Image (cartoon, grey):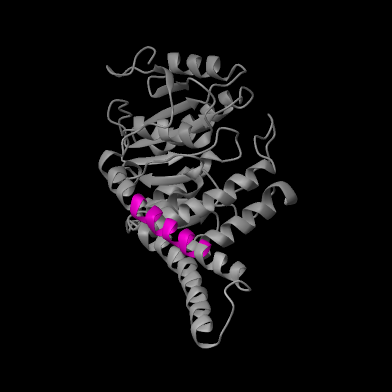
Amino acid sequence: MSNDATNPKLSIVVPFFNEEENVEEMYTRLKEVLGRIGEPYELIFVDDSSSDGTYALLKEIFRKDERVEVLKLRRNSGQTPALQAGFDRARGEIIISMDGDLQHDPAEIPQFLAKIAEGYDIVSGWRKDRKDNAILRKLPSWVANRMMKKLVKVQIHDFGTTYKAYRREVVQSIHLYGELHRFIPALISREGFKITEIPISNIVRLRGKSKYGLSRVRRVFFDLMTVKFLVSFLDRPLQFFGLIGMVIGGTGFLIAALLTIGHYFLEWSMRDNMGNLLLAVFLMIIGGLFIMTGLLAEVISRIYFVTHNQKIYSLERIDSRRPDGAGAR
């Protein structure tokens, strides 16, 4: 089939940050695999403001291959904004995201495409036999994956890997921020898309330095709470905050009612129960504030759905052969 770079069927989005030792080999492997597949494709390489020679190498690849587009972010923004930038530029019917550190094997791309051909909308990689450090990577990942399965009821084993394939309509329906790229299947589950996973190899990094550490555990924990809220309560936040407010305010009301009954019918002294009375008033105020927060969140959520078009990245330059893509932005 023709490899028409102006009308690609496949878009491969790869973010890079200080990966100068892996760029050339990643490109070579991708080109070899995609050449065997035979479908028109494009490679979208996103440089997350690397401080080494990554961008220079990507620029050189762009010069010699018309199917390559390079995005350079103005500042180091993280993997999620880098992926979102690539998704926004992707034109393919099927979009595949993967890491640029060679821990994802391009030779497995046909397996993702085979599952998409079966009718699935998202195909997620599953690092079934992980080779990572047990404390820094495997244990936090195991805990996060177990929690996510319980919270959002999406039955896949590995939410954390970037290696995923999407139909174009899936990517168009999501808007990422924070570090939510790892939870795309959960975020998109509320839309009714068909999701599956395939085992992938978990290759040990051979060159370059890992960008992950224990500091990521805290961010993942808060992202889990964010995803749960977005999936279950984004369009009805009053259900979340209102329930908390009712429980807290209701507890305060019961304490106040009990004190009132005791004072009028059991001769309880209000002076002796002043601490309990203040607690009841405090709980009722807090409960009311939660309910008011829920009402405010309802208004904000409506604004979110109407005006949700803000970018989470800042492009310094786009190296592209498209009429709208040349030069600095």
| Residue at the image point whose x is 57% and y is 21% from the top | 50
> From the image, which quarter does the C terminus lie in?
top left
| Residue 128 appears in the rendering | no
Q: Percent from the top left, x then y, of residue 257?
A: 47, 77
Horizontal side, residue 13 vs residue 4: left or right: right
Q: Percent from the top left, x then y, of residue 293?
A: 40, 53
> From the image, which quarter does the N terminus lie in?
top left
The majority secondary structure of the magenta stretch comes to helix
Q: Residue furthest left?
A: 306
Front one among 319 and 35? 319
> Number of marks in the image?
0
Picture quarter containing residue 84? Answer: top left
Q: Bounds of the magenta span?
A: 282-296
**In the figure, 237 relative to 249: above or below?**
above
In the rendered structure, does residue 31 fall within the stretch colored magenta?
Answer: no
Q: Residue furthest bottom?
A: 265
**In the figure, 272 relative to 61: above or below?**
below
Q: Percent from the top left, x then y, of residue 210?
A: 67, 35
Front one among 69 and 257? 257
| Residue at the image point whose x is 53% and y is 18% from the top | 55
| Residue 244 appears in the rendering | yes
| Residue at the image point whose x is 31% and y is 39% from the top | 308
| Residue at the image point whose x is 45% and y is 39% from the top | 177
**In the figure, 288 relative to 62: above or below?**
below
**In the figure, 74 relative to 148: above or below?**
above
Q: Percent from the top left, x then y, of residue 201?
A: 60, 48
